[in-house]
Image (cartoon, rainbow, N blue to C red):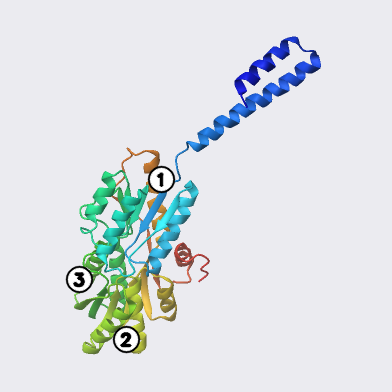
Amino acid sequence: MNTKTEYKEIVMNTKTDSHDAGVFARHRLGLAIGALMGTMLASSSAMAAPQKVIEFIPTSSATPYFLREYDGVKKEAKKYGYKTLFQAPSVATHISTQIGMVYTAITRKVNGIVLVPYSPTGLLPPVEKAMAHHIPVVVTDSTLTPMKALTFTAVPDKKAAAAVASYAAKMVHGHGEYAIIDYNLSDTSARYRRDGFEAAMAKFPGMKFAGLQISHSVPETALRETEAMLTSNPKINVVFGANDRSALGVAMAVKRMHLQNKVVVVGFDADLGELGYIKSGVIKASALQSPLLMGETAVKVLHEHFIDPTKKFPQYIPLPYHLVTYKNYNSPASVSAIRQYLAGYKG
């Protein structure tokens, strides 16, 4: 429709036609203006910014914790109409694969990245490149050295691990030997948990360090390592699995060796597998964090940055943790904390 010509014709008719013709003309004028506005709105819609894309890149696609964190990323992104992508190495030790995935996300020109860096230094160059290309990065669970991303969000790993250690030491009356099955030598969260656990154990003079093994987040590896350590050193009465996969392997080994009444197993993350062992008493305590909340927090930060790119964020945004034990897993506080991680949990 030529709205300019149509408008001119209607105005002329309103000056010369009868009353009825004038009413009809005014009606046609309204239709013409409506058509013009519709054209303008359609044009405006076509020019609207494309849907923003946030990519989540954890250390492994086989870890339930990170799959749940991605649920948090998707849940929060949906509020703002953002699209999400997921890619991760099949095995956590494939650092070069994760590095390549970040570079691929940059090439893909995503709008933001949520990253769980396996190496605090190895992932630094691609993160710096992303930030330089105005692709904000929020790191979760483990940080970078130095911290060059938009921000870092996680639980206070040292503090949470110290709480787990104190609980275990008190269970054995402060006497015995403890071992740690960690999941990584370089990951900052792994180091912080290890440091926090050892620092708390140092407050119990009767506790002696018996050794450290690395599981690389493979339960079967943690199982074999635990069996070997307990077989070679029967004085070990505390074993700490520093993440969900490690703690699961430790629990399987202790149960298989029928040592659940002699060895105090404690862990970190308290995923579905760990909770089963907590309920049966094989795992005595675990520091529970919420991957769902972690993913949501990361996307909230990215959203605020999209709105105001000049906004400054703290280098670290702490998240809460909860010590769930074989005695309190049915308490209101534990049920509430576990529901963050496992929707519909009833105790």
Left or right? Give the position of 128 relative to 84.
left
Q: Earlier in the sequence, mark 1 or mark 3?
A: 3
Q: Secondary structure at mark 2?
A: loop
- Whether 274 is drawn above or below 195: the answer is below
Residue 217 figure quarter: bottom left
Residue 42: x, y in percent? 55, 35
Q: Which residue is mark 1?
A: 303
Please name the amino acid that badge 2 sits on.
Lys
Q: Earlier in the sequence, mark 1 or mark 2?
A: 2
Look at label 3 and name its amino acid: Ala
Secondary-structure class at tag 3 = loop
Indicate which disc, 2 or 3, sits on the residue closer to the N terminus. 3
- The spot of residue 192 in percent (x, y) is 24, 63
Q: Amino acid at mark 1?
A: His
Label annotation for residue 202: 3
Residue marked by disc 2: 262
- Residue at the image position 36 percent from the left and 73 percent from the top: 285
Question: Could you tell me which residue is drawn at 28 percent across and 59 percent down?
Answer: 100
Residue 172 is at least partly visible in this image: no
Rendered residue at 22%/73% (across/down): 204
